[in-house]
Amino acid sequence: MGYQNQRIAYGSTLVELGRKNKDIVVLDADLGGSTMGKMFEKEFPDRHFEAGIAEANMTSMAAGLAQTGKIPFTNSFAVFAAGRAYDQIRQTIAIGKLNVKICGSSSGMSDFGDGATHQAVEDMAIMRAIPNMTVLCPADANETVEAVKAMAGRKGPCYIRLNRNDYENVTPEGKPFQIGVPSVLKEGNEIAIIATGYMVGLALQAAKALQDEISVKVINVSTIKPLDGKILYEMVKDCKAIVTAEEHSVIGGLGSAVAEAFCGTPKPMKLVGVEDTFGSSAHSYQDVLGYYGLTAEHIADAVRKMNGKPETVVRNQF
């Protein structure tokens, strides 16, 4: 254990699950070395299926395997897993409520070198809009391990998005994952930061930077759908405003899900995420995050604004 990379945590957990359940099978679309499907292939070569650069075919294969009682996990980059195979996911897996698990690897801006074509900034919006689909976005490698176990045990279609890069864990190792239930990582009573994925760690950094200015609560929402709005509202009801933070478009992702959940009892909100634009290539992950305003400093600035103070961080113009 002790992983610091979500992809390695995912691949290792698939192997662990595969040892316990012979019905688990894994499919890759020519990216097993990146998605870490290769780890399952090495241990269970007869239960790993290489579909080549053909995500749509891979997804249809998974649907067929699910019909025979198998529990298939399909792997690809998030931009292809959610986009290229959308029709097969919708028409066959989701309408039929088939027990297929879809992993979108290298999500958000984490594939910093390959640019817009490989950076999924809309995958949660796509998958969230599909009826019967569960959508997960774990905060770190520790939570990934438990989220994969939870989705394997959940009947029906599931989508999980994972980051490409190494980074520190912010959630405890071994904590059971409850699909649909958010968790408070830091208490506070003025402004609540509701974050998902890699941005959870940045939200905690922002709260620490603001500790002498503003009392900030940090909430990890690792299930984008279903989202228990009642539990989430109880967590933020004493706060005067909310900042959401996601490595995803501000259209249709976490911020939208929170706004929809709170529409009957609204609170002032500011969404930190990718504005209505595609990604771009960069020399490093931190460079691309900085360019798109996905940093602890930008989150802290949004909190200050919601607390009635002027913004101080210069934002890039697109």
Image: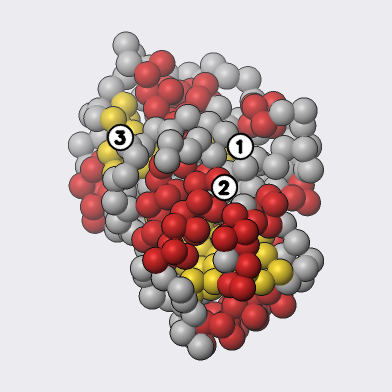
Q: Which mark is residue 276?
A: none
Residue at image point 61% right, 73% down: 46
Q: Is residue 21 above or below residue 116?
A: below
Label 1: how many residues lie within 10 Å, few (<14), some (14-19) or many (20+)? some
Q: Residue 192: percent from the left, percent from the top?
A: 33, 34
Q: Is residue 151 left or right of residue 58?
A: left
Residue at image point 32% right, 37% down: 172
The alpha-carbon separation of the residues under discs 1 and 2 comes to 8 Å
Q: What kind of element bears circle 1?
A: loop
Q: Is residue 300 above or below residue 63?
A: above
Amino acid at pointer 2: Arg
- For label 2, the residue is 7
Residue at image point 43% right, 23% down: 205
For marks 1 and 3, the one nearer the N-term is: 1
Which of the pair 211/306 is nearer the observer?
A: 211
Query: Which corner quadrant holds the C terminus?
Result: top right
Q: Nearer the viewer, mark 3 or mark 2?
A: 2
For marks 1 and 2, the one nearer the N-term is: 2
Which of the pair 50/62 is nearer the observer?
A: 50
Which of the pair 244/311 is nearer the observer?
A: 244
Query: Which corner quadrant holds the N terminus?
Result: top left
Amino acid at pointer 3: Leu
The alpha-carbon separation of the residues under discs 3 and 2 comes to 23 Å
| Residue 78 at least partly seen | no
Q: Which mark is residue 165?
A: 1
**Quadrant in the rendering for residue 44:** bottom right
Label 2: how many residues lie within 10 Å, few (<14), some (14-19) or many (20+)? many
For marks 3 and 2, the one nearer the N-term is: 2
Q: Which mark is residue 185?
A: 3
Q: Residue 54: percent from the left, percent from the top?
A: 76, 71
Q: Is residue 201 left or right of residue 11?
A: left
Q: What coloring was used for the rendering?
A: secondary structure
